[in-house]
Image (cartoon, grey):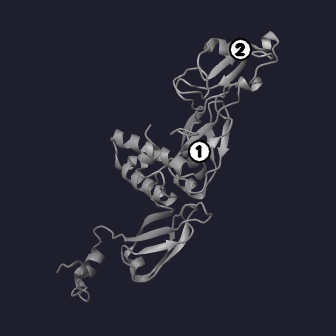
Amino acid sequence: MADLYGVLGVKKDASDAAIKTAYRRLAKQLHPDRNKDNAKATERFKAVSAANAILSDPETRAKYDRGEIDEEGNPKAPAFAPGNPFGGAPGGGFGGFRPGGGAGGPAYEFGGGGGDPSDLFAELFGRANRGGGGSPFGESARVAARGADRAYRLSVPFEDAARLAPQRVSLANGRTLDIKLPAGVETGTQVRLAGQGDPGAGGAGDAIVTLELAPHAHFRRDGDDVRLDLPVRLDEAVLGAKVRVPTVDGPVTLTIAPGATSGRVLRLRGKGFARKGGERGDQYVTLMIDLPPADEELRAFAESWTADRARNPRAALGVD
């Protein structure tokens, strides 16, 4: 997998805000809803989401920068110099240790050459069996392998993501757990469940759940805000009205002032997505006047209404 900073198109020293901006731009461009039947865009969307999941979290970003985890968030094995696992002179194989004599048994010194690697390991790990005082590395030399991590994908309903409602996930080990959604959750956010991966002699691995926000039939997400197009009748727009409006928290009453026009935007505070700081975004409602089809009474009124015909509402656009 490519370098995560390269996936998002930012430099390694990019600020958190720059990473967030780059992710949102790419996610909007590559989202499956806008790229149906485009497998390459879908794969890039997944890669961008995975990169953001690691780089948007200060802790995992620091681990990635230090080389402690890979591009998938998995721990890396300790790195050794090629041909020189114990840190001796480059190109010397196991010659970084040199066996020497001594009253207390063989000693191994850094910096020399020669010596048989098989003799070295036999001496290092076999002294306890010969009564030579135990392995120089002790029992910690025998590190038990940890179980592998398990990856899962979980679709989260739009309203649940905004409200941070707990989600239930079924794991391969037969367990069903409720997970808490983090503030600022978005498609690609990962939740790690410690010890819920594959078993191993050194302990079980983790379950890594990648979240995908399901699209909604009416709501649209805009950063931490929610947008909704609201149909209103002509009389409600002209005379004003109180109407019921859906939100992610349930319906509320919205007041429409007399003389409202299509495109007017009204705001409902605190009805958006939960932010990392604890507050929530807003919901923006765009009024859309909905006219009835083939209404003879309305047609007759429009034909007889001459008071406003001299006004050109498109004059600001530069057309007559």
At label 2, which amino acid type do we have?
A: Glu
Q: Residue 24's image quarter?
A: bottom left
Q: Residue 202's image quarter?
A: top right
Circle 1: is it few (<14), some (14-19), or many (20+) Cα within 10 Å?
some
Residue under the image location 61 percent in, 49 percent down: 59
At label 1, which amino acid type do we have?
A: Lys
The one nearer the camera, 137 or 75, is 137
Residue 162, position as x, y percentages in the image: 56, 58
Work out whether 275 lies above or below 44. below
Q: Quadrant of the C terminus?
A: bottom left
Disc 1 target residue: 63
Work out whether 143 lies above or below 230. above
In the orientation shown, which residue stands out farthest toward the left? 320
Cα distance, mark 1 to mark 2?
36 Å
Q: Secondary structure at mark 1?
A: helix
The one nearer the camera, 50 or 122, is 122
Q: Is residue 42 left or right of residue 241?
A: left
Residue 216, position as x, y percentages in the image: 46, 54
Residue under the image location 58 percent in, 34 percent down: 76
- Which is nearer the N-term, disc 1 or disc 2? 1
In the orientation shown, which residue stands out farthest toward the bottom? 307
| Dot 1 and dot 2 residues touching (CB under 8 Å) | no
Whether residue 121 is visible to the viewer of this picture, yes or no, is: yes
The one nearer the camera, 238 or 267, is 267
Q: Point out which mark residue 198 bears.
A: none
Q: Quadrant of the N terminus?
A: top left
Disc 2 target residue: 123
In the orientation shown, which residue stands out farthest toward the top? 130
Whether residue 213 is visible to the viewer of this picture, yes or no, is: no
Q: Is residue 174 left or right of residue 301?
A: right
